[in-house]
Amino acid sequence: MGGRRPAVAGMFGTAVVAELAAITLSWRLEPAYDTLLYVLFNLAAVGAGAVIAWRRPENTIGWLFLGFGLLNTLASDLAHGWGLRAAAEGWPGGPVGEAISAVSWLPSGYGWVLTFLLFPTGRLPGRRWRAVPWIGAAGLLISMTAWTLSPDRGRDFVSGRNPIAVEGLPTGLLLAVGMPLFLGALLAAVVSLAVRFRRSAGLERQQLKWFVLAAAVAGVALPTSFALWYVSPAASVLAAVALTGLPLAASAAILRYRLYDIDFFISRTVAYAGLTVLLVASYAVVTVALGTFLGSGSAWTVAVATLVCAVLFRPLRTRIQDVVDRRFNRSRYDALHRMTTFLDDVRAGRRPPEDVQPVLGKILGDPGLELLVFLPESRRYVDLRGTARDDADGRQRIAIERGDQPVGVVLYDGAGPLGPELVRRVVELGGLAVEIARLRAELNVQLVEVTASRARIVAATHAERRRIERDLHDGAQQRLVSIGLALRHAQHQLGLGKPTAPPELGGSGEPDVAAVRATLDGAVAEATVAIGELRELARGLPPSQLDAGLGPACEELARRAPVPVSVRMPERRFDSGVEAAAYFICCEGLTNAVKHADATRVELIADHDREQLVVRVVDDGIGGAAPRGGTGLTGLADRVAALGGTFQVDSRPGAGTTLVAELPCGS
């Protein structure tokens, strides 16, 4: 590669310098358009060859364009300019320059023989075509000899006479032999291009579309210009324009074949040309028909004819485009037709909208194509099963939008036969199915979340019930049993207990008061502990203050808190479930702020907004809180979701934490 690029730069630079010299030599000695058009063609060939050889040095086409473009620059334009200037100024070597220029079209034509045979891969289309370059080379040598030495070529020289003609040489016979060989090789090369195009598929076919179009134009223009070469000056202009399109098309085909959709260009051109003809014909028929009755100059005639054309425009355009696509752009027709058929099946209920993904995969030629839909509530992309996915995995993507709102994205490998514009058109056409699939995926995600939330609530309720049972059994229940036994023992000591000692032994005969007091003190202590345990158990249950409303309950929370707490609650009452949920949100938020966030100030706020009670707990702590599995915040989210509300946590590190719950509460 390192040695090839200097060669490319050197050849391109030589061609540019030679063309500048050719323009200087030829200027005002021939029509300016003749000079500039062929300079443009040669620079287009050399420039296209340089770009291809620079970017794709392994491709023979780039070097072909560079080679015969440089040959044309030197042998055609520069030699021609020297011949003209030498004849005008009396310089030496003028006839030699004119002779070289006159015969230069033959090597240039042979360059196109090789180009048609080798495009776009740089290899022959098959073994049977190996003889074509040799036949063309033989015809080239014979024809060049005859053309150069023929006495009949005097019109190619300023003097009107070929100074290097050989009178006795049978140049006519040589041309009769060489020219059929040369033109036959050129025709065979064109046929090989058509055969290659017919057999091609995928990337190669996409490349060939560009070049075949330019070759078809040149195939009509070049024979015409050859036949009129000595009849009209326009023949040289026609040839130059047609030839300029070939290297440009070849460069676009090899390097930028996906940049423009050539099928779209052809089909739209043909469709609108046909539409124009039909509308003009309709306008003429209506004008003539109405002019018979209303007069040819009537304004009503013009108005009605215009109205008829306006009414016919859309249905005619649709119908003509369909016919043209079926004939000239079959891939576009098939792609749009398959998507339209699928949408009809979706509307009729014969296919689910989720089938849009495999349908797009078949149309775009990518079985691995994936459709992700956007969920506005969670602001994330999920697949059609509801699984969260990353929408940037390195594949090509086509965003699907409705207005400014994202709906989904198609991820595909980009190696299919369709151009990017047609791909986007197919995806947009399937937008209805994508939108329905998105809504169903969103519903599936919500159902999964509701199911998981209900499962967590049931599990949490069961675990809480088991904890209360265990704590009651191991704590308060055992202590109450112990209290009962102690009281029974005290009763026994008071009524059935033995005296401390008989009177005859020096005792009083009364019960031991100290022992009874000790028993009762132990029972009282056990009762105190049991009361504390029962209070601990009741701490997670709605307090009795909720009987007076949410405000008093939160005021009680604020009084017990070790940090300053401001409370702003509505005075009106709400459903007991809503008030309990709001109270627990305030409890959990306040506990987290004190226990985990090192907050110095907390706000408990509730506002009644339309049909929702919006509860906020705001602290100035360290932040960084997030709902995780098994945490109190997750339990709050589940509790809020069970009521049909939404729960959000805004907790950036160093910026405090804000809990926001929106609870449906009626009007």
Image: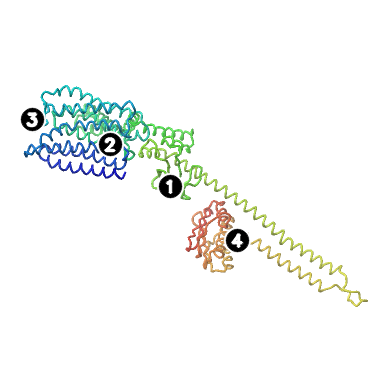
Q: CA distance from mark 1 to mark 4?
A: 51 Å
Visible residue check, residue 308: no
Q: Nearer the viewer, mark 1 or mark 4?
A: 1
Q: Nearer the viewer, mark 3 or mark 1?
A: 3
Q: Mark 4: which secondary structure?
A: helix
Visible residue check, residue 648: yes
Determine the residue located farthest toward the bottom in the rendered image: 506
Amino acid type of the residue that numbered disc 1 sits on in the rendered structure? Ala
Sequence order check, earlier mark of 3 and 1: 3
Residue 552 tag number? none
Instruction: Estimate how packed mark 1 is, as few (under 14), some (14 to 19) or many (20 or more) residues with alpha carbons within 10 Å.
Output: few
Q: CA distance from mark 2 to mark 3?
A: 38 Å
| Residue sitting nearer the eye, 251 or 132 | 132
Which quadrant: the N terminus? top left
Amino acid type of the residue that numbered disc 4 sits on in the rendered structure? Leu
Q: CA distance from mark 1 to mark 2?
A: 34 Å
Amino acid type of the residue that numbered disc 2 sits on in the rendered structure? Ala
Sequence order check, earlier mark of 2 and 3: 3
Residue 160 tag number? 3
Q: Where in the figure is residue 242, as x and y percent of width and height?
A: 22, 33
Q: CA distance from mark 3 to mark 1?
A: 71 Å
Q: Is residue 412 left or right of residue 23?
A: right
Q: Where in the figure is residue 108, as x and y percent of width and height?
A: 21, 33
Q: Which residue is mark 1?
A: 392
Quarter-of-image position of residue 178:
top left
Q: Where in the figure is residue 667, as x and y percent of width and height?
A: 52, 54
Q: Nearer the viewer, mark 2 or mark 3?
A: 3
Instruction: Estimate how packed mark 3 is, as few (under 14), some (14 to 19) or many (20 or more) residues with alpha carbons within 10 Å.
Output: few
Residue 249 tag number? 2
Q: Which residue is mark 4?
A: 546
Q: Mark 2: which secondary structure?
A: helix
Q: Is residue 325 left or right of residue 40?
A: right
